Image (tube, grey):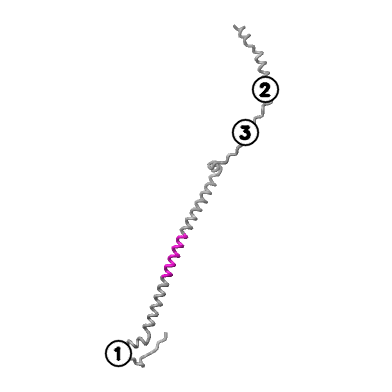
Amino acid sequence: MTALRAQEYDFEKKAVDESIDIENTLHVPAPKAERPEVVVVPYSPSRKLDRISRMEKVIITVIILMAIGLSVLTISIRASINQAEQDITTVQNKIDTDKDEVQQLEQEKSELSKSERIQKIAEKKGLSINSDNLRKVNK
């Protein structure tokens, strides 16, 4: 049986055939592999955020919060200014009304304190004017 096996398998011939095949494949230039065309894919928002450091994210967040805070502060200040202007207008209208009333009362006072009017009322009541007792007072 050992003889049959030796004849069935010719190790020397097989080894020589394999060495020839290896030599032929080594000297044959390999076909150049074509590189696929490079496609540039834009970054997705999550990948762009990954490129930003934490400090930059903190700075951007602080800037946004400051902008929102300043806009709210500006609106509240503007509202308080408008309220103050309305209060000033109300007070000025009251002052104007009071001035008109004071002027009207002064005019009425001057009409009531005229000497002719006082003299007529005195004569109706039966009073007489004594010239010796009259004095003129200057303001």
Q: Residue at x 37, y 87 (%)?
A: 116
Across and down, in percent, residue 136 comes to 39, 88
Question: For mark 2, does the 10 Å Cα neighbourhood hold few (<14), some (14 to 19), or many (20 or more) residues?
Answer: few
Q: Are marks 3 and 1 in contact (CB under 8 Å)?
A: no
Q: Which residue is mark 3?
A: 36
Question: Is disc 3 placed on a helix, strand or loop?
Answer: loop
Q: Is residue 21 left or right of residue 130?
A: right
Q: Which residues are magenta?
A: 77-93
Disc 2 residue type (three-letter): Thr
Q: Earlier in the sequence, mark 1 or mark 2?
A: 2
Residue topped by disc 2 = 25
Corner quadrant of residue 106:
bottom left
Confirm whether the magenta stretch covers residue 111.
no
Residue with the mark numbered 1: 126
Q: Who's the residue at 47% across and 60% down the image? A: 78
Confirm or deny contact between disc 1 and disc 2 (CB under 8 A): no
Could you tell me what secondary structure mostly forms the magenta stretch? helix
Cα separation between marks 3 and 1: 131 Å
Mark 3 is on which residue type? Pro
Estimate the x, y position of residue 6 in percent, counting from the top left.
62, 9
16 left or right of 42 in image: right
Secondary structure of residue under mark 1? loop
Which of 3 and 115 lies nearest the eye of the viewer? 115
Q: Marks 1/2: CA distance?
A: 156 Å
Estimate the x, y position of residue 115 in percent, counting from the top left: 37, 87
Tag nearer the camera, 2 or 3: 3
Secondary element under disc 2, as helix, strand or loop, is: helix
